[in-house]
Image (tube, coloured by chain):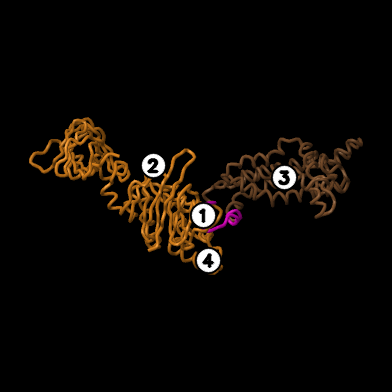
Chain colours: A orange, B brown
Amino acid sequence: MTRFDVDIEFGYASGFEVICRWDDPIEPRITVLLGASGSGKTSVLRCLAGLERPHRGHIRFAEEVWFDAARGIHLPPDRRHVGVLFQDYALFPHLTVERNLGFGAHGLSRQAAGARVAELLEMFRLTGLERRLPGELSGGQQQRVALARAVFRRPRILFLDEPLSAVDRPTGEELREELGALIRTLGIPSYIVSHDRADALTLADRTVLFDEGRIIQSGSTQEVFDAPLTPAAARLVGVDTVVMGRIASVEAGLARVVIGGCDVRAAAPAGVGHDAALCIRAEDVVIARHDVADSSVMNQWPAVVRSETMQGAFVRVGLDCGFKLSALVTRDAWRRLGLKPGDRAWAIVKAASIRALPRG
Amino acid sequence: MDWVAVGLTLRLAALTTAVLAVLGLPLAYWLATTRRAWRPFVDAAVAVPLLLPPTVLGFYFLMSTGPNTAIGRLYEQLAGGTIPFSFTGILLASVVYNLPFAVRPFVAGFAAVDRRLIEAARCLGASGPRTFLAVVLPLSWPAVLAGLVLAFAHTVGEFGVVLMVGGNIPGVTRTIALAIYDDVQALDYAGANEASLMLLVFAVSVLAVTYSLQRRMPTL
């Protein structure tokens, strides 16, 4: 199988160093590089596209060597035959939609170029906008023009840098769906850089977590989101509460952890040491006015309501049970409870919903 | 009016501007986009005529192009004749002296072009030169035109370098600025006034054109 073999180190003047290694099969799937801003993920993308030169290592795409520090090889972007979708799209402001699309047409006959432009206009629902300038398009139209332009030359691989950060949130949801559908139709292997876990959850076959210039975890999106291996990974995939505690005992895979006076029971994978990070998703927390007897639940903590934030059909409730705990409940349920900040309540979480991660 | 001097001046300015377009545009593009460590030294070398008295530049130019220098001998073999006190001499000196007047506006114009557009063009398979012609130039032409106009105008009004390198030979190196100097020496104030007024009107018009071009720089 042909492979995309990357092993690079890239250093900034500030001393911050980015290291990235993978050896992926080249197949039409979407990989999202998920990381906070400043984690170095965009630098990786720029190195892959040929816009930056790594300091060490190599990049091999199938039979081609794109970069090899030891042999002094560094192919410029125009010879890598890749498609790049830039953050904010980087459409040429002085060229019409048609001419933006056909910018990569050199080497093609006028006829062939015209046919390809027409084909893309149709496929990306841009017919009628041929003569518009980019400044006269909506955000969604701009994104479609940018993607159509990027795939004009039938690139073998697509790199997308924060493709949805340029638009506001409701538009973003729509565009994300559209983008995913288009990329899947195209069938081109794609790497998307993003800081938004929604991009990974909705678009990615594989997710690569990036933190402080390093890949900290990678795998199928399901795998990565279900089982983050470190506290940093847990924060990236959106586990709402990550608290550090000391393991008092482990018995048959169940750990007893003491945090701020609370006794917490959590699922403990093998190999947990003395310190652990407990990951609790807000949607797994139940809020009650009284503690419940005769139930299977292992964790019931007295808590004080600290905050309430409306989030669509849900309310995010900040609780203090000796540590800060975030809970997500429906608006109806919250109204029925009739609680407000300052009130006392109980936080209830099944032990199986709490993951104890080795602290790293 | 010394129409021979006027014709010679225009020819000198036009050729200087043409040479600066050919040499200055690539140089400016390199300066605007490079991240090499020695870029500041090239910047300084380009800007140095702004600070040096024309006499100093002219002096070194004479010293390095005289008949006994390597450059002088090469020129004699290739073209016959000498560089100092010839039209070629004042043309070369003008090019060097006017480099900052053309290159600095070019660099400012190129630097104002969003770098991502250049990167996007490269990723779409365009080579460096094609990127320059299809993206950078169309987005920075007012700055390029302003640089060319400034270089042209500055050459028209140049005095010191032309006098040092070219002497004052009618029909060969005697430009309009030198003709004015001669008129004043000869107490021909009417002749000097005529030519001076022409240069003054020319200079004001050129600056007006330049400033209006700078306003037209497309905002990205």
Residue denoted by label 3:
B151
- The dot on residue A212 is 2
Q: Cα distance, mark 4 to mark 1?
A: 32 Å
Residue denoted by label 1:
A73
Quarter holding residue A123: bottom left
Callouts 2 and 4 on one subunit: yes
Q: Which callout, 1 or 2, points at the residue further toward the start of the chain?
A: 1
Kind of residue indicated by mark 3? Ala
Do labels 3 and 4 touch, CB within 8 Å?
no
Residue drawn 26% across and 49% down?
A226
Kind of residue indicated by mark 2? Glu
Check disc 3: other Cα within 10 Å, few if <14, some if 14-19, many if 20+.
many
> Which residues fall within the magenta stretch?
B118-133
Residue A38 visible (yes or no): yes
Q: Cα distance, mark 2 to mark 4?
A: 43 Å
| Circle nearer the viewer, 3 or 2 | 2
Q: Secondary structure at mark 4?
A: helix
Q: Main secondary structure of the magenta part?
A: helix
Residue denoted by label 4:
A113
Badge 2: chain ID: A
Q: Cα distance, mark 3 to mark 2?
A: 50 Å
Kind of residue indicated by mark 4? Ala
Do labels 1 and 3 touch, CB within 8 Å?
no
Kind of residue indicated by mark 1? Ile
